[in-house]
Image (cartoon, rainbow, N blue to C red):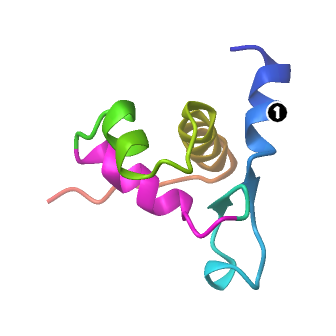
Amino acid sequence: MTVSESQSLLHRIVIDAEICHGKPTIRGMRYPVESVLEYLAAGDSFEDVLAEFPDLEREDLLACLQFATQSLKMRSWQLVTA
């Protein structure tokens, strides 16, 4: 994926204090990025998520993944191990 494509996808993610308490959402709809990532992390395929939420597009799911990637790059995480 090129930098241009990556930036284009990120435009699909909206942070608005009036929508979902300011959590990042897809295209300003009430689909939090966090929820979509949870579906994907639980093993749902893109096709599963798109069938469940017909308002969403494949590029929206890619945007969620790109947003998560960019968020991790901006933060330093320390994993706690048991």
Image location (x, y in percent) of residue 5: 78, 22
Point out residue 59 in the picture as x, y percentages from the top left corner. Answer: 62, 32
User: Predominant secondary structure in magenta?
Assistant: helix
In this view, 49 is above or below 23: above
Residue 17 lies, with reference to residue 56, above or below; the image says below
Q: Is residue 10 left or right of residue 51?
A: right
Q: Is residue 38 magenta?
A: yes
Q: Quadrant of the N terminus?
A: top right
Which residues make up the magenta segment?
Answer: 29-42
- Dot 1 amino acid type: Gln
Location of residue 19 (image quadrant) = bottom right
The front one of 61 and 3 is: 61
| Residue 25 located within the stretch drawn in magenta | no
| SS type, badge 1 | helix
State the residue at coordinates (75%, 85%): 18
User: In front here: 51 or 35?
Assistant: 51
Above or below residue 15? Residue 13 is above
Say which quadrant the C terminus sits in: bottom left
Q: Is residue 1 left or right of residue 64?
A: right
- Looking at the image, the residue that sits furthest to the right is 4
For disc 1, the marked residue is: 7
Q: Is residue 47 left or right of residue 12?
A: left
Image coords of residue 3 (percent x, y): 81, 21
